[in-house]
Image (cartoon, rainbow, N blue to C red):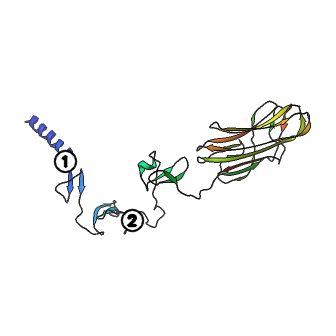
Amino acid sequence: MKKKILLLMGIFSIGISCAQVGINTLNPEAVLDIRSTGSTTSTKALIVKNNTGTEIFSVRDDGRIITAGVITPSVLLDLRDGTDNSIVAVGQSNQTGAIAGGGALKYDTSAKSLYLSDGINWNVLASDYIKAFVVADITNASQNFANNTTNTISNWTIVSDQTNSFNPLSGIFTAKRSSVYSVSLNITLDDGAVNARTQLQASIKASGGQEVKCITTFNTAGTLPTGVQCSGNFNLALNETLSTSLWHNLGSTKNIKVEYNNLTIVEL
């Protein structure tokens, strides 16, 4: 008898697990099939309340979703309840614009921009976000450059940095978004002896491997001011860094000439 009861219980459990539930319908077409009884926009097919009995979510008979604070939605999903939390979050997607379909919206975490699909391609939506703009100079001669040695140019003084992207002590710039950045560097050293057939080389290098080198050459020896200018455009990924460095074989250690140096980084 005990075995028969257990067998019946097993069969009954299987029947429940495979059953469909219908509300206001005898022939449910899904695991849970709810049919509203009204036919007007004021009829609610589904209501969800919190523990205080306050309605926080409902679905009308016409398919429109009602969220907390929005009594009469004017669109299918209306979050405009008049409070500071009336927002919707959009995430990243690896789908193409064609697969997602026209009207789809995504957020690109690298570019930090919203994109809208036209049914073929993803198109960035216009934004007034603040672009990187860095201007820095060197106001003290705290760094020197030994002969035949490459040194990162550091100890800058910030004149402008709208996005807090530049570390003046290390001289490293960090891209806050994937974009193209234009960099211009001007370095001048103190007057001093220069050997013949020597050079002064400035480098602008990205952590991803892109690098621009610029050289000033000196064919004859003498005592004269030395300097080098360098510029280039860099396609940087999010959090990729830029740094500048100096190398020379002029014959002796050289010092920065204060207030004759400049670094500019502009996001295009």
Q: Is 23 rendered above or below residue 166?
A: below
Crowdedness near tag 1: few (<14), some (14–19) or many (≥20) residues, C-alpha within 10 Å: few
Taking the view exactly as shown, the residue that stands out farthest to the front is 120
Circle count: 2
At x 80%, y 46%, the residue is 261
Taking the view exactly as shown, the residue that stands out farthest to the left is 1
Element type at mark 2: loop
Q: On the picture, is 208 further left or further right than 7?
A: right
At x 65%, y 38%, the residue is 210
Taking the view exactly as shown, the residue that stands out farthest to the right is 222
Q: On the picture, is 259 further left or further right than 58?
A: right
Q: Position of residue 163 (x, y in %)?
A: 64, 52
Crowdedness near tag 2: few (<14), some (14–19) or many (≥20) residues, C-alpha within 10 Å: few
Q: Quadrant of residue 4?
A: top left
Q: CA distance from mark 2 to mark 1?
A: 35 Å
Q: Amino acid at mark 1?
A: Ala
Element type at mark 1: loop
Q: Is 64 rendered above or below residue 238?
A: below
Depth order, front residue of 157/30: 30
Q: Position of residue 200 (x, y in %)?
A: 81, 36
Q: Position of residue 230 (x, y in %)?
A: 75, 42
Of the image marks 2 and 1, the number of the one nearer the N terminus: 1
Camera-nearest label, 2 or 1: 2
Which numbered circle lies on residue 19?
A: 1
Q: On the picture, is 244 further left or further right than 224?
A: left
Q: Position of residue 244 (x, y in %)?
A: 72, 40
Identify residue for label 2: 75
